[in-house]
């Protein structure tokens, strides 16, 4: 049992004791102690050893409480310093020959010293365990070109009503990710009742709503397409399409993750504001005055007054009436039936991740929702699959790799860590041959802690695994680029690829009988999501 879990156990037990202390009176068979020990025995997450330790803690606390009350009754101060030497058992043995309150005082002081010493050891072990966890989870990783955190985002736009954060180029730390160098990732956050002024950008884009409710309007060549959006919606926006957006919720912020594929320049795109004035600057005003007067058939004075009105930035506050007017109806949809299960979806430009009939993979350890191009045709433009994994706290995904797809993942909620198998990585370049690798090592473990908004990339062919913390579920939004003809190879659990080997291949590859290979690779009977490493500790393995 780890130092951390011991400390957690003690805290739980003391909490239970204090809970019942106010309402239970002392009796010959103390009801407080009885209740505490009962709570220990019914804790389903404890094994027998943990239950016994829990009961002992109840008894020790009960004895301490009685000792303190006895000392107060005879006028003694229970907090007077006393230093019997040695461990608890040795110290208590010295109290046996004493009588009455003096014996109680002696025993109490032994426990006090033991608790101080033990708490100190717990603290030291806890610090040591935290350091080990940090090292295991990549906290000490000095060069990790696959992981991007807060420091790798820059604020492209920021006002009191919203902001846009742009992730650095994927090749910023190393050219090892140049296979996705023409993609950029951005986060849009809009405050309640805010309006994003009309704009367009020179990039194809996939928007995914990770929180909130809004209304998005796209201006096509021959029509306006408006539709309400909510958590899980995937929206495709073709390069150059004018759009505007509102957050129609009174209290909740709207979060949108954007994956962009620039058209004009590799790994760089521009945003153009037609509406606006001084801030944001409208591109109309960049034309010469003569051109603008002729094009709009309006005098210079009127144009200057008109474009000078807007000066509060690209995120504006909208009134309740304006929000209701823009979100009360949706335009551009055809067909009937409950979206997205009607003859045609609500919009050809949108699809919802969570309105599929069922997840691709689901058990008590996690869920995986996936949308591919046969369900949402617009993903074909990107050769892309969008997925959302919700890993139960303390659990893990199955280790696997993609045959040709590159995974771009962002943590939406929760925390945990991931591990990936990679050829050794150099800070200078990914093109070094084996001469730049560590002696005797063909692979390197890449690992990192995962928190909200952490982005990590998994190249094709690289085995990896993600693990949720023991405190929270880990929710991850994934974009998998180059999905056409991709195969996902599971390395453990039901359907893992070793189970497809011939008998002779198994025996030659692992230098073991087929039965032993099958026992190892067939022992995990769950598929895709498993209990995590710390959940497995204490279990009997075959």
Image: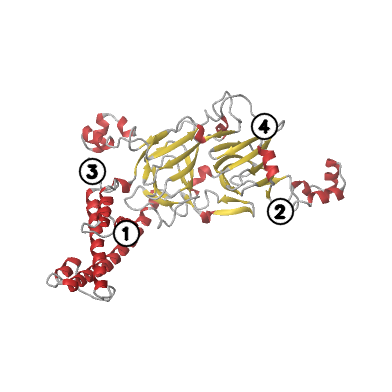
Query: In terms of sequence position, does the residue under pointer 1 or pointer 4 come before the other?
Result: 1
Q: Which secondary structure lies at badge 4? A: loop
The disc at residue 312 is 2
The colour scheme is secondary structure
Tell me if residue 447 can be seen. Answer: yes
Query: In terms of sequence position, does the residue under pointer 4 or pointer 2 come before the other?
Result: 2
Picture coordinates of residue 456, whole percent (x, y): 47, 47
Q: Which secondary structure lies at badge 2? A: loop
- Residue receiving disc 1: 21
Q: Residue at x 29, y 57 (%)?
A: 6
Query: In terms of sequence position, does the residue under pointer 1 or pointer 2 come before the other?
Result: 1
Decide which of 412, 465 is in the foreground and name it: 412
Q: Residue at x 55, y 53 (%)?
A: 153
Q: Which secondary structure lies at badge 3? A: loop
- Residue receiving disc 3: 540
Front label number (4 vs 3)? 4
Picture coordinates of residue 121, whole percent (x, y): 28, 65
Query: In terms of sequence position, does the residue under pointer 2 or pointer 3 come before the other?
Result: 2
Crowd rating for badge 1 (residues with CA inside 10 Å; few <14, some 14–19, many 20+): some
477 relative to 49, above or below: above
């Amino acid at each position: 049992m780890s130092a951390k879990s011991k400390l957690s156990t003690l805290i739980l037990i003391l909490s239970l004791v204090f809970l019942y202390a106010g309402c239970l009176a002392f009796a010959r068979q103390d009801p407080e102690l009885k209740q505490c020990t009962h709570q220990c025995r019914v804790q389903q997450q404890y094994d027998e050893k943990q239950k016994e330790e829990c009961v002992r803690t109840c008894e020790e606390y009960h004895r301490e409480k009685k000792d303190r009350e006895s000392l107060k009754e005879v006028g003694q101060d229970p907090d007077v310093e006393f230093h019997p030497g040695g461990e608890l058992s040795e110290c208590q043995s010295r109290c046996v020959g004493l009588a009455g309150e003096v014996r109680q005082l002696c025993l109490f002081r032994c426990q006090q010293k033991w608790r101080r010493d033990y708490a100190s050891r717990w603290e030291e072990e806890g610090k040591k365990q935290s350091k080990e966890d940090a090292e295991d989870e990549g906290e000490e990783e000095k060069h990790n070109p696959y992981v991007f955190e807060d420091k790798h985002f820059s604020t492209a736009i920021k006002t009191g009503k919203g902001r846009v954060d742009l992730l650095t180029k994927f090749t910023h730390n190393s050219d090892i990710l140049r296979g996705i160098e023409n993609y950029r990732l951005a986060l849009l956050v809009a405050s309640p009742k805010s309006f994003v002024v009309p704009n367009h950008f020179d990039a194809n884009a996939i928007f995914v709503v990770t929180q909130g409710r809004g209304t998005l309007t796209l201006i096509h060549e021959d029509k306006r397409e408006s539709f309400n959006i909510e958590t899980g919606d995937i929206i495709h926006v073709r390069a150059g399409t004018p759009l505007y957006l509102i957050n129609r919720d009174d209290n909740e912020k709207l979060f949108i993750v954007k994956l962009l594929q620039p058209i004009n320049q590799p790994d760089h795109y521009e945003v153009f504001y037609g509406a606006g004035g001084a801030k944001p600057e409208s591109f109309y005003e960049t034309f010469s005055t003569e051109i603008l007067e002729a094009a709009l058939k309006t005098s210079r004075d009127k144009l200057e007054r008109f474009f000078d009105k807007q000066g509060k930035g690209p995120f504006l506050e909208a009134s309740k009436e304006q929000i209701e007017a823009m979100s009360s109806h949706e335009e551009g949809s055809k067909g009937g039936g409950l979206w997205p299960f009607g003859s045609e979806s609500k919009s050809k430009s949108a699809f919802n991740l969570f309105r599929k009939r069922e997840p691709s993979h689901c058990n008590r350890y996690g869920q995986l929702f996936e949308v591919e191009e046969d369900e949402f045709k617009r993903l074909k433009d990107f050769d892309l699959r969008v997925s959302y994994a919700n890993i139960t706290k303390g659990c893990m995904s199955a280790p696997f790799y993609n045959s040709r797809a590159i995974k771009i993942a962002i943590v939406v909620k929760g925390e945990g860590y991931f591990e990936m198998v990679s050829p050794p990585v150099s800070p200078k370049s990914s093109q070094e041959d084996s001469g730049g690798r560590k002696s005797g090592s063909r692979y390197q473990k890449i690992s990192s802690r995962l928190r909200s908004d952490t982005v990590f990339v998994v190249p094709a062919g690289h085995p990896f695994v993600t693990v949720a913390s023991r405190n929270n579920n880990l929710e991850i939004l994934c974009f998998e680029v180059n999905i056409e003809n991709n195969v996902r190879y599971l390395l453990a659990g039901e359907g893992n690829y070793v189970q497809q080997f011939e008998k002779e291949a198994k025996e030659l590859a692992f230098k073991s009988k087929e039965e032993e290979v099958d026992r190892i690779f067939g022992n995990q009977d769950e598929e895709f999501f498993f209990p995590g490493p710390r959940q497995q500790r204490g279990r009997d393995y075959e």
